[in-house]
Image (cartoon, rainbow, N blue to C red):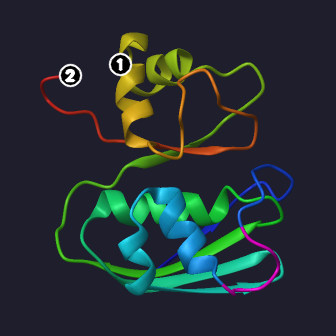
Amino acid sequence: MGLFDFVKNAGKSLFGSSDANAAEAIAKEVGDPTLADKIKVEVDGENVKISGDIPDQATKEKLILAAGNVEGVSKVEEDLTTAQTEPEASFHTVEKGDTLWAIAAKSYGNGSQYMAIFEANKPMLSDPDKIYPGQKLRIPAQTADA
């Protein structure tokens, strides 16, 4: 179980201040509407709790980010269990002037690895140039062949 902080005034309007349809909105944001039946989402003002059984670590991290990168949300508490174990990604909070290239250079020592970050955040990111200050991104563990 983990607790994650987010920038309350950054993000998009994904769901209102109640948990009605919040699981569906988050599952859709992650790109897998079938997850809505596997997770439970509770919204309490600016706090979101998400729980359930999900397939893998990448999906877990995307669910946390989808719930937290919402306008008005400042904390996400997760109690998600995964069927597969794999290395955890780190999270990066976008600052003014950041680019995926710069984030990749800082994270991997090579800016040309920016597409790994973009791919790890799809479908929540639709374009590598469309990131905003306050947004949190998944930075997957660097593979040996990268």
Q: Position of residue 49 (x, y in %)?
A: 60, 83
Q: Nearer the viewer, residue 15 or 55?
A: 15
Q: Main secondary structure of the magenta part?
A: loop
Residue 110 belongs to magenta span: no
Question: How many numbered discs, if any?
Answer: 2
- Residue tagged by mark 2? 146
- Using the image, determine if residue 103 lies above or below residue 136: above
**Does 67 appear above or below 96?**
below
Query: Was residue 19 drawn as part of the magenta stretch in this picture?
Result: yes
The reply, left or right, for residue 113 in relation to residue 1 is: left
First in residue order: circle 1 vs circle 2: 1
Q: Which residue is mark 1?
A: 113
Q: Residue at x 30, y 41 (%)?
A: 141
Q: Is residue 142 left or right of residue 32?
A: left
Q: Secondary structure at mark 1?
A: helix
Q: Are marks 1 and 2 in contact (CB under 8 Å)?
A: yes
Position of residue 99 in the picture relative to residue 85 (left or right):
right
Inter-mark Cα distance, 1 to 2: 8 Å
Give, as a three-letter code, the residue at label 2: Ala
User: Can residue 3 be seen?
Assistant: no
The magenta region covers 15-20
- Judge the density around disc 1: few (<14), some (14-19), many (≥20) Cα neighbours within 10 Å: some
